Image (tube, helix red, strand yellow):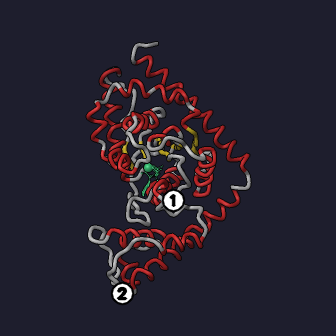
Amino acid sequence: MTATATRPCPRVLTGDRPTGPLHLGHYFGTLQNRVRLQREGADLFVVIADYQVLTDRDVADRLALYVQELVLDYLAVGLDPEHTVIFTHSAVPALHQLLLPFLGLVSVAELQRNPTVKDEIAHSRQVAVSGLMLTYPVHQAADILFCKAQLVPVGQDQLPHLEATRTIARRFNARFGKPGSPVFPEPQALLSQAPLLLGTDGGKMSKSRGNAIALGASEDETARLLRGAVTDADRRIAYDPVGRPEVSSLLTLAALCLGSDPQAVAEGIGDAGASRLKAVVTEAVNEYLRPVRARRAELAEDRGYLRDVLARGNARANEVAQATLAEVLEAMGMH
Ligand code: ATP
Ligand code: MG
């Protein structure tokens, strides 16, 4: 279920895996909504999901570096640590303790049916599917519910996980809550206008699939990556998301950067072909990201500040997680 923010100050949780720097899919899929919600006064929590890196690989490469890169990306796009809690999974033990009761609320068949997990298994670097891969949507329910988030700005791939979280909240309340006073809210997903931006290979743009344009990429790198993007042989550029998904995703990207709409961008290009389309997209992206990249470069000079932002976020997330865990244990009759 998707919704727009209905309360003046909703509690919001969202996050990313530290598997690489954030890309344009993140920006238009979720970061922009996060910044807007922050501006509107939402109580925003952002998790850097370091434990979830190991869902699809044996070793978490360059973890410390990627965690810092994520903090940099967040601050560069406008998340403000005075208003937004940025924290890492591994620093908040009480959050993970919620996983145990939550696992008892879902069936193995439900876990195996999750379409996003199936897609990720198909792209996984592991020979066998781990228990972590199958259960991480339940872990994500703990991420969302530890702070009782009402709204979760995410991309389309997260909708099955949100549905799982809603189910877990409902079942927990029914099994352990007192009538009329639920322990957990049922959070809602908030999708953007670009809930599934495609990468340069025509699949979902993903940090881990070598098909992404990072927010912090240089202008030349952006041009090179876009030149290599998959398109099709039809010289007439038209917006047709079903018949021509790759061309249409590029048009969407240009339109988002230009504040235009994809049809208008297509008409401007006409029958000048894919190379013109790519040139238009490159210019639009580089122009749009210029201030973000400048700010990112500035912030990158002060690593101590980035560490301090995380330390403060971790401390606040721990307070909230401990309070929720106490409530959960009480509801379950354990304390
Ligand atoms: P990985 O390949 O390591 O899984 P990812 O690019 O899929 O990385 P995540 O950290 O898994 O990024 O996802 C973080 C958030 O960004 C989620 O809310 C997800 O829905 C959103 N998101 C990721 N990729 C896209 C995309 N291509 N379009 C729109 N939203 C996206
Ligand atoms: Mg992902």
Which of the two labelled residues, at mark 2 and mark 1, occupies the earlier sequence position? 1
Q: Amino acid at mark 1?
A: His
Disc 2 and disc 1 in contact, CB within 8 angstroms: no
What is the number of callouts on the image? 2
User: What kind of element bears circle 2?
Assistant: loop
On the rendered structure, is 296 left or right of 38? Answer: right
Most extreme residue toward the front is: 127
For the residue carrying disc 1, how many other residues have a C-alpha within 10 Å: few (<14), some (14-19), or many (20+)? many
> Picture coordinates of residue 39 (x, y %)?
54, 53
How far across and how far down the image is residue 45, in percent? 52, 42
What number is the disc on residue 40? Answer: none
Q: Nearer the viewer, residue 51 or 299?
A: 51
**Residue nearer the viewer, 145 or 270:** 270
Q: Judge by depth and name the residue closer to the eye, 222 or 59.
A: 59
Location of residue 126 by image quarter: top left
**Image x and y of residue 142, in percent:** 44, 33
Describe the element under mark 1 as helix, strand or loop: loop
**Which amino acid, by three-letter code, is at mark 2?**
Asp
Q: Which residue is mark 1?
A: 23
Image height check: is 267 above or below 105? below
Comparing 133 with 80, the one in front is: 133
**Residue 3 visible somewhere in the drawing:** no
Alpha carbon distance from label 2 to label 1: 29 Å
Who's the residue at 49% across and 55% down the image?
A: 207
Residue identifier under label 2: 271
Residue 326 placement, left or right of 105: right
Is residue 223 toward the left or the right of residue 141 in the image?
right
Q: Quadrant of residue 132?
A: top left
Q: Is residue 207 visible?
A: yes
Q: Is mark 1 within 8 Å of ligand 1?
A: yes
Taking the spot 43% from the left edge, 59% from the top edge, the residue there is 205
Q: Residue at x 46, y 54 (%)?
A: 30
